[in-house]
Image (cartoon, coloured by chain):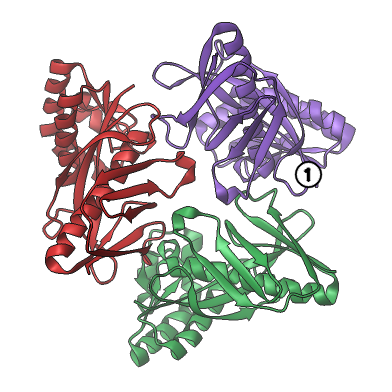
Chain colours: A purple, B green, C red
Amino acid sequence: MRIVSADTGGAVLDGAYEPIGLIATAAVLIEKPFKTATMSIVKYADPFNYDLSGREAIKDEVFLAIKLAKKVKPDVIHLDSSLGGIELRKLDDPTIDALRISDRGKAIWHELSKDLQPLAKRFWEDTGIEILAIGKDSVAVRIAEIYAGIYSAKWAIEYAREEGSIRIGLPRYMKVEIHESRIYGESLDPREGGLYGEIESNNEGIGWELYPNPVARTFMVLEVWRE
Amino acid sequence: MRIVSADTGGAVLDGAYEPIGLIATAAVLIEKPFKTATMSIVKYADPFNYDLSGREAIKDEVFLAIKLAKKVKPDVIHLDSSLGGIELRKLDDPTIDALRISDRGKAIWHELSKDLQPLAKRFWEDTGIEILAIGKDSVAVRIAEIYAGIYSAKWAIEYAREEGSIRIGLPRYMKVEIHESRIYGESLDPREGGLYGEIESNNEGIGWELYPNPVARTFMVLEVWRE
Amino acid sequence: MRIVSADTGGAVLDGAYEPIGLIATAAVLIEKPFKTATMSIVKYADPFNYDLSGREAIKDEVFLAIKLAKKVKPDVIHLDSSLGGIELRKLDDPTIDALRISDRGKAIWHELSKDLQPLAKRFWEDTGIEILAIGKDSVAVRIAEIYAGIYSAKWAIEYAREEGSIRIGLPRYMKVEIHESRIYGESLDPREGGLYGEIESNNEGIGWELYPNPVARTFMVLEVWRE
């Protein structure tokens, strides 16, 4: 089974360790033994001008997952939306109303599905690949989240090189290590069975520190500065 | 405090990593310091012809726990049903209706209690041993779950010896290691304080691989084959 | 950001491993990198004569946090009550009614706020320091909880020195190590990013054992005895 997934994460933090805006959407290809990605791509957002409602993230994720899927032809696409594994192409208005989610969630999906449902339907007709709203049960979604954190660290390094320093929040219970020519990240939850990721990055002349976010237990803060 | 518990787990998986049927019910005796079993017994099901509704598992667990309890005379039996620690012998229809569980859970227990309540009452009258529906709060239940996973690995090895290979899903966040003459299993959740188990098994000529289930985060897959 | 927090934990257990009463309220000062306390104080309760409803604990926590805050002048105080981070000084009756908590929680807070709301208001007017009901999202609250466990171990050692032995339950998923002249404690949840604490204590002539509480999964039991 070859799975493509996408997720958005990593946030620029303000002085009170609260998120200002999200940084990176990562799409990944996952293959057996499902512990890391065999391919990954990224799309950066502008965290200083970000819609935190969740709409922007989901659209970015669908577009980026389809972009990678066109290239690597996976068996299925997993989306970070916990709608019980339903196929995105079947998400019309009556189906959304029947979902067991909050009224706010339904309102968001009624809006999102206008664009995304026809897109998913066309993609399925062309390729036979389903896009499933499986959410937190998917290991592929979690690995995409870890890569979103790793790419956010890369973004932070490039930002610090120009602006001097920055403080970002990583996705839930994960850490990163910044080495000279690569960034390594891994889940801090051993129940997940050893999920990790790695990308190349020139990190010379960069200092960094990782520590718990004091107002968001199980989330880590990464500080990066030009040395 | 000496506790007997039983739990059912381990599942044969289909090609999409979804469970077809459960493999093993394990009953265990737990004594201080409550990290592993001092005795264990198993009853195998037929995973290719299994009632996944949960009824079969609970009955198997009660029967197997009583079988072990008759031998080792524990202080109490813990059952993997989160009904607030209520005594099984008191579970009559009005009591079930008053439980804070789903309507589906009530329907299942109305049916189950017809057999199990008189059985528990008689066992208590004979031995003074209570059967408590304590569920997930019990370390004994969790150790029984880990043994169900270990015995499922043993079943998989015997199956692979005859049929060539098989892929099973282990109970939640646990791993197994297949050594030459034993199978070791342990919890992947360090918050549980180091729970583990071990059984003897002739594993010569067997190859194996353990990896995360891509569609069930925090659950591991075990593949076993004849070499 | 410098945070003061307080939490109550550690319980004397009966023969069935159920709590009789709580032992220690700890207040801590937390500073970057937010993994341990730079200062801590304790107030011991009488666990053999304890109000387990939660009212006593919250009052003790507010008083002890304010006591430490007067000394160390933090930026903010975090309270172990998950009320969405609301300021304690704003917790009047209409605000409590509008909270998304259980009716029992509302009844408790209507009673508690009579004393605590004016106290928080006066403290804020004097110092500008807010007391936030942030609860489980706060790393400071979790570190206070770990220190409550460490101080409970110290209490148990002193008790065992006089009475021979005792068995206590630690706060959720944490362990302690009793060394000759200090007690070390740490979180068993790696997702929290390495939270720990340490206090001095004369532990000569004391034996101890740590193991899972069989009826409270993810909670550890500490037994201490005079050798």
Residue drawn at x 36%, y 39% is C136
The correct choice, above or below, for A100 with respect to B128 in the image is above
**Viewer-proximal residue among B80 and C78:** C78
Residue A32 horizontal/vertical position (percent): 77, 48
Residue C96 horizontal/vertical position (percent): 24, 32
Residue type, numbered disc 1: Glu
Residue extending furthest toward the top: A163
**Viewer-proximal residue among A127 and B195:** B195
The correct choice, above or below, for B28 with respect to C102 in the image is below
Residue C212 horizontal/vertical position (percent): 39, 63
Which quadrant of the figure contains the N terminus of chain B? bottom left
Q: Secondary structure at mark 1?
A: loop
| Chain containing the residue with disc 1 | A
The answer to whether residue C86 is left or right of residue A35 is left
Residue extending furthest toward the right: A126
**Viewer-proximal residue among C92 and C168:** C168
